[in-house]
Amino acid sequence: MVEQERIRQAVRQRYARAAREGCCGCGLPVAAETGCGPSLGCGNPVAHAHLRPGEVVVDVGSGPGLEVIEAATLVGPRGRAVGIDITPEMVAAARGNAAARGVPNASFLLGDAESLPLPDDVADVVLSNCAINLVPDKLRAFCEAFRVLRPGGRLVLSDVVAQQPVPPELRQDLEAWSACVSGAVDLEDVLRMLRAAGFDATEVLEESPVRWGSAWGVQLRSVTVRARKPRREPRSRGSGC
């Protein structure tokens, strides 16, 4: 496995370029006028989150912020939506998008999924769309999502998973990592890590094939998974955290 910080740096560089050039990384096209659309390739976690007025939503890997803006609109003025992204250029683009659309309850912070810049028990919902595959330590990311959720809160994750083992040499390829290929793991590994982080009521809502892995000789599919933080003591953690 390549060093984790080298992976993070490769991801930052690719998505900084994507922000400058108006594309989405992962080899995906840009949606007309609005940058990366809310459901390009991996799914639409907002649609499965069943957001309610007044809720607090955190989007991990928020990119240009369109799902955060959508979530902020759905939770209304008594709620808020916070996007977290590892790339300064994406955070700046997201803030500009929220300001241009006049959505004051959408905000954006620089940070990574393995160390969210938020206090414990702050969110009703955590979303992520095609971002966890880019994270070197996925269990740590799920533990962080668990930490910031309130008891009874829910995680809705859309991402790519590998349909067969990713070759060891491809795990060493930083370009393939930043293209949402090398970091993909098996769906059962995702579910196992969610349970280890402490989540329960885990369910797979959608599955569909994606195309871009074929360029690397890897079969990928997108999945949307929903899980819940149990209603128990606020700071109880999973055994894997």
Image: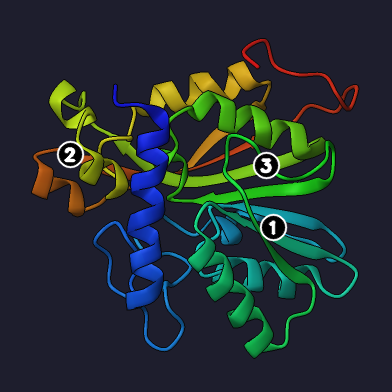
Pointer 2 local density, CA inside 10 Å: few below 14, some 14–19, many at least 20: many
Q: Position of residue 190 (x, y in %)?
A: 46, 27
Q: Position of residue 48 (x, y in %)?
A: 59, 54
Residue 124 in view here: yes
Between circles 3 and 1, the one closer to the viewer is: 3
Say the numbered circle drawn on residue 50: 1
Disc 2 to disc 1, how far (Cα)? 30 Å
Label 2 or label 1, whichever comes before in sequence order: 1
Residue beneath label 2, please?
219
Label 3 SS: loop
Which amino acid type is shown beneath numbered disc 3?
Answer: Leu
Which amino acid type is shown beneath numbered disc 2?
Answer: Gln
Between circles 2 and 1, the one closer to the viewer is: 2
| Residue 241 falls in image quadrant | top right
Q: Position of residue 236 (x, y in %)?
A: 82, 19
Along the line of sight, the residue nearer the viewer: 161 or 66: 66
Disc 2 to disc 3, how far (Cα)? 31 Å
Q: Residue at x 40, y 29 (%)?
A: 4
Q: Position of residue 25 (x, y in %)?
A: 32, 61
Pointer 1 local density, CA inside 10 Å: few below 14, some 14–19, many at least 20: few
Q: Residue at x 42, y 78 (%)?
A: 35
Which amino acid type is shown beneath numbered disc 1?
Answer: His
| Residue 231 falls in image quadrant | top right
